[in-house]
Image (cartoon, grey):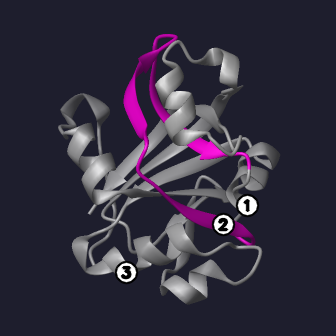
Amino acid sequence: MHVFQPLPLDLFELNPFTKLNKEWAIVTAGTKKEANPMTVSWGGLGTLWNKSVITIYIRESRYTKEYLDKNDFFSLSFLPNENRNALSVCGSVSGKDCDKWEESGLTLNSRLGIPFPDESSLVFLCKKLACIPMTSDTFTDNEINKKFYENGDYHYMYIGEIMDAMAR
């Protein structure tokens, strides 16, 4: 397998609408010894507070939220197409009930103490800057509230500064 290479953000080009919505990503939080990977398809990349940031959205009910809340760092990783099944596993089973690394066939790796799947083709290593709860009164469009939060399982918006990026 190819070695990860640094990816300068000013040379980086990608379509975030395709990358997140169609290809999906894995958010991983925890430590090199204990981490939980979870598939995400909602998020964004951009600039906030004069920093390059990633925004991800995690529901209150997700086990990964515990890892995000306990740790100051997380990764957002994209896998090559041959690992599509791993994305399905990491999005459909809970780390409370099984070892997602084993179930998905992914290998836990880390850089700068931040965990990520070794099979990734693109990895962003992030420092958590903010965690903002979404509640029924935060929506100006009540249809969103009705459609996505009928059961009250709201998302939290996590904003992370991109500390390092690497690609294969």
In the image, is residue 38 part of the stretch drawn in magenta?
yes
What residue is shown at x 50% (from left), y 83% (from top)? 104
In the image, is residue 156 part of the stretch drawn in magenta?
no
- Which of pointers 3 and 1 lies earlier in the amino acid sequence? 1
Q: Is residue 88 above or below residue 135?
A: below
Q: Please indicate whether residue 134 sits to the left or right of residue 48 in the image.
A: right
**Which part of the image, by quadrant, shows the C terminus?**
bottom left
Front-most of residues 158 and 126: 158
Residue annotated with mark 1: 63
Front-most of residues 113 and 19: 19
Q: Do the numbered discs 3 and 1 sit on residues whose CB atoms are within 8 Å?
A: no
Say which amino acid is labelled 3. Answer: Asn
Residue annotated with mark 2: 36
Q: Secondary structure at mark 2?
A: strand
Which region is colored magenta? 32-60
What residue is shown at x 27% (from left), y 39% (from top)? 16
Q: Is residue 141 above or below residue 168?
A: above
Camera-nearest label, 3 or 2: 3
Q: Do the numbered discs 2 and 1 sit on residues whose CB atoms are within 8 Å?
A: yes
Camera-nearest label, 2 or 1: 1
Q: Secondary structure at mark 3?
A: helix
Question: Disc 3 and disc 1: Cα gap in Å?
Answer: 20 Å
- Which of pointers 3 and 2 lies earlier in the amino acid sequence? 2
Query: Image quadrant of residue 149?
Result: top right
Q: Is residue 97 visible?
A: yes
Q: Position of residue 148 (x, y in %)?
A: 53, 40
Residue annotated with mark 3: 85
Say which amino acid is labelled 2. Answer: Asn
Front-most of residues 109 and 80: 80
Q: Position of residue 165 (x, y in %)?
A: 39, 45
What residue is shown at x 40% (from left), y 57% (from top)? 25
Magenta segment's dominant SS is strand
